[in-house]
Image (cartoon, rainbow, N blue to C red):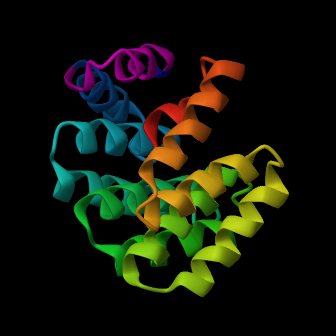
């Protein structure tokens, strides 16, 4: 059922994903993966308080699991709660998250919070985890300095090389 819930979420049906997660949680209330998936579905549904509760439950059940912190960071970043986002992304990194996207999101939150030096450090770590990130980070810096057209050229070049490049599409 987890795979079905994940498929529903990936296909944009957060309501059905959440319904399946609730069904699973009846039998497995301490499954951190299901709690995280439920949290992601709840975020998509705009039910942020419920999402935060589910994600915090997952983090307390499995304290070394970085994903709940990544999802909390994403939610807080989208809400403009940059200090909270920074705290959650940093916690995910402390717990061993190796996804370069987490560093990019941390860098974004730090930039929005006005801490450019720390943002550059996080983005540098992202490049070390994924060498292809250098172009992405350059575009991000151009965007932040008001050079959107130059950034767009980089994004378009990235998409021309890989039409499935989600990072280039969403930035």
**Residue nearer the viewer, 76 or 21:** 76
Q: Position of residue 167 (x, y in %)?
A: 56, 38
* Magenta stretch holds residue 155: no
From the viewer's perspective, is 19 left or right of 108?
A: left
Residue 8 falls inside the magenta stretch: yes
Who's the residue at 46% across and 57% down the image?
A: 147
Q: How many marks?
A: 0
Instruction: Say which of 149 and 46 sits in front.
Output: 149
Q: Residue at x 36, y 23 (%)?
A: 9
Residue 167 appears in the figure:
no
Q: Quadrant of residue 15?
A: top left
Magenta residues (range) = 3-15
Task: Name the residue at 66% across, 71% down.
Answer: 122
| SS majority, magenta | helix
Q: Position of residue 128 (x, y in %)?
A: 84, 59
89 relative position to 26: left or right: right
| Left or right: 126, with 27 as reference point | right
Split into 4 quadrants, where in the image is the N terminus?
top left
Q: Nearer the viewer, residue 98 or 140?
A: 140
- The answer, for residue 164, to whether it is visible in the render is yes
Residue 119 at what x, y percent from top left? 58, 76
Q: Is residue 155 above or below residue 24?
A: below
Q: Position of residue 108 (x, y in %)?
A: 48, 65
Q: Quadrant of residue 37?
A: top left
> In the rendered image of this protein, does residue 124 appear above or below residue 43?
below
| Left or right for 85, reference 119 | left
């Amino acid at each position: 059922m987890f795979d079905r819930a994940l498929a529903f979420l990936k296909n944009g049906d957060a309501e059905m994903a959440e319904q399946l997660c609730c069904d699973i949680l009846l039998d497995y209330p301490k499954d951190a993966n299901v709690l995280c998936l439920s949290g992601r579905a709840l975020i998509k549904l705009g039910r942020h308080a419920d999402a935060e509760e589910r994600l915090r439950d997952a983090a307390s059940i499995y304290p070394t699991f970085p994903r709940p912190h990544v999802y909390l960071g994403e939610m807080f970043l989208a809400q403009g709660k940059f200090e909270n986002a920074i705290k959650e992304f940093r916690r995910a990194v402390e717990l061993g998250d190796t996804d370069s996207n987490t560093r990019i999101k941390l860098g974004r939150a730090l930039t929005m919070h006005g801490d450019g030096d720390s943002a550059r450090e996080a983005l540098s770590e992202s490049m070390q985890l994924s060498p292809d990130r250098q172009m992405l980070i350059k575009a991000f810096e151009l965007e932040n300095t008001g050079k959107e057209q130059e950034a767009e050229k980089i994004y378009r070049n990235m998409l021309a090389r890989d039409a499935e490049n989600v990072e280039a599409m969403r930035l």
